[in-house]
Amino acid sequence: MQHEKSLEFLQIAMKYLPEAKEQLEKSGIELSMEAIQPFMNLFTTVMAEAYELGKSDAKSETE
């Protein structure tokens, strides 16, 4: 289950990657896939934690 969510989170990140790349390049920061990898890992960790928090909140509301 966790792996499936990680893949979903990565798909979301990839959806917005072109916009992020454009904004960074406007600021003079060049973005490569090698440079972005640590951020993608951080993103999936944050999203997994947010997902678990939402899941926990939803569960407590139904009890």
Image (cartoon, helix red, strand yellow):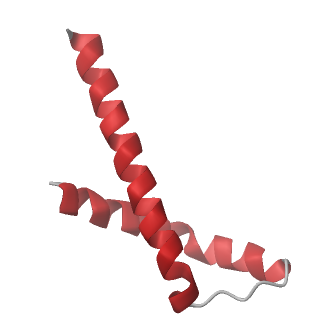
Residue at x-position 20% and y-position 63%:
3
Residue at x-position 20% and y-position 8%:
63
Quarter of the N terminus within the rendering: bottom left
**Where residue 23 sits in the image (x, y, percent)?**
76, 73
Rendered view: 11 above or below 46: below
**Where residue 50 sits in the image (x, y, percent)?**
41, 42
Q: In the image, 58: left or right of 40?
A: left
Q: In the image, 11: left or right of 59?
A: right
Examine the image and state in which quarter residue 6 appears: bottom left
**Where residue 10 sits in the image (x, y, percent)?**
39, 68
**Where residue 45 sits in the image (x, y, percent)?**
39, 57
Q: In the displayed image of the protein, which residue is found farthest to the right? A: 27
Rendered view: 48 above or below 13: above
Residue at x-position 31% and y-position 39%:
52
Rendered view: 62 above or below 19: above
Q: In the image, 31: left or right of 51?
A: right
